[in-house]
Image: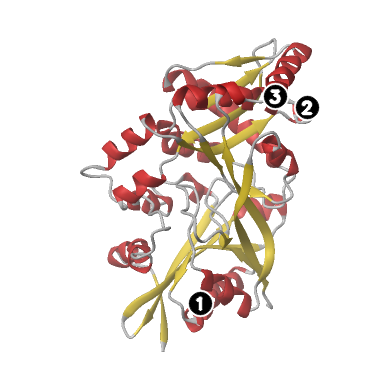
Amino acid sequence: MIEIVEVTSRQQYRTFFQFPFELYRNCPQWVPPITKEEMDIFDPQKNAVFEHAMARLFLAKKKGKVVGRIAAMINWVEIEQLKKTKVRFGWYDTIDDLEVSQKLIEAVESVAIAEGMTYIEGPMGFSNMDKAGLLVHGYEHMNTMITWYHYPYQKVHLERLGLEKQSEWIEFKIDIYDAKDAPEKVARFAGVIKERYKLKTLEFKTTKEVEPHVDKMFELLNQTYNKLQSFVPIQQHQIEVYKKKYIPYVHPDFIKCVVDENNEMVGFAITMPSFTKALKCINGKMFPFGLYHLWRALRKNNRASFYLIGIQESYQSKGVTAIIFQDIQEMFNKRGITEVETNPELEENKAIQAMWKNYKHELHKRRRTYRKNISL
């Protein structure tokens, strides 16, 4: 018999975030998150998203042992501005037992019914800045710090329970050319675009130099993705959280900005050294050696992750991405980076995917959110 327990105590809260370490203990592809950061996501005192969101966490138990977990979330901005009456679910992890998944999904459905929502969708977080998508292809590859790993049976469970595909994300692995082998046409095209629109790139030496530009970056993110189906506007108080959460991880070399003749930002990209191997070593705990492993990954790494890109709406079809990627290519060459993994991109986002056409690339992972309508 499966028992569903809502998380209400501090001990249950810890158990919720420790469960994946047991479930994926022997999985070499699973890259653990930093436990404290995961816990902070659901702490209303530390995550400003709770100013316009709610969450309930559930554990599944079998014979007294925890065998699954799931989070149910409502983003009221999504409901009030976009009129999408849905409950999001995420942090979905379970043993290979269909009944466990069934009871976890039923717990999410019960939240939807109680709040008058019409459907559920997941796995996803509170907003576009959180992890999203169940891994459905590429199980042989490790996840990155901004994605989840799932076992193949989790896809089978959701589909057998009647959930249907809603959105699909794809991820690419890209080989970076040596400086001598880089396509000349890419550099030439970037130069033409710079001259035609009187654009220039900004170089940053310190994180402090980056900080004044971060708000504009998020403004461009809202412009870049506002027509995609899963988009939810990023609120200012969320931006403040993301500044503290992510910017310290990023070396200034990995942030590229393009501005016009009036120094108005028209595009940017944020890449990061790959933290995958470092996070495997850290195994969820920053102390005593976590900072050392992250520091080492920042400075000695031949792999990187493509994290965020934003383009001003009026420039989205004018080739600004060529300027950005040319700058990234040169920086990667200087740092000895030979391989890049993209963040998940919605399958219909062809504009972003076109960036990789001049490089050897492989679509190596797919993620999917699933939807189920609720009968009230």
Residue 345 position, x and y percent, is 64, 47
Q: Nearer the viewer, residue 182 or 136?
A: 182
User: Does 276 sit above or below residue 168?
Assistant: above
Label 2 is placed on what type of residue?
Answer: Ser
Residue at image position (74%, 49%) is: 348
| Residue 288 visible, this orientation | yes
What residue is pinned by disc 1?
101
Residue at image position (44%, 16%) is: 205
What residue is pinned by disc 3?
186
Q: How much space separates mark 3 and mark 1, taking CA atoms?
A: 48 Å
- Dot 2 crowding, Cα within 10 Å, few <14, some 14–19, many 20+: few
Residue at image position (47%, 65%) is: 56
Q: How much space separates mark 3 and mark 2, taking CA atoms?
A: 22 Å
Q: How much space separates mark 1 and mark 2, taking CA atoms?
A: 45 Å
What residue is pinned by disc 2?
314
Which of label 3 and label 2 is nearer to you? Answer: 3
Q: Secondary structure at mark 3?
A: helix
* Residues at discs 3 and 1 in contact (Cβ within 8 Å): no
Figure quadrant of residue 300: top left
Q: Nearer the viewer, residue 171 or 348?
A: 171
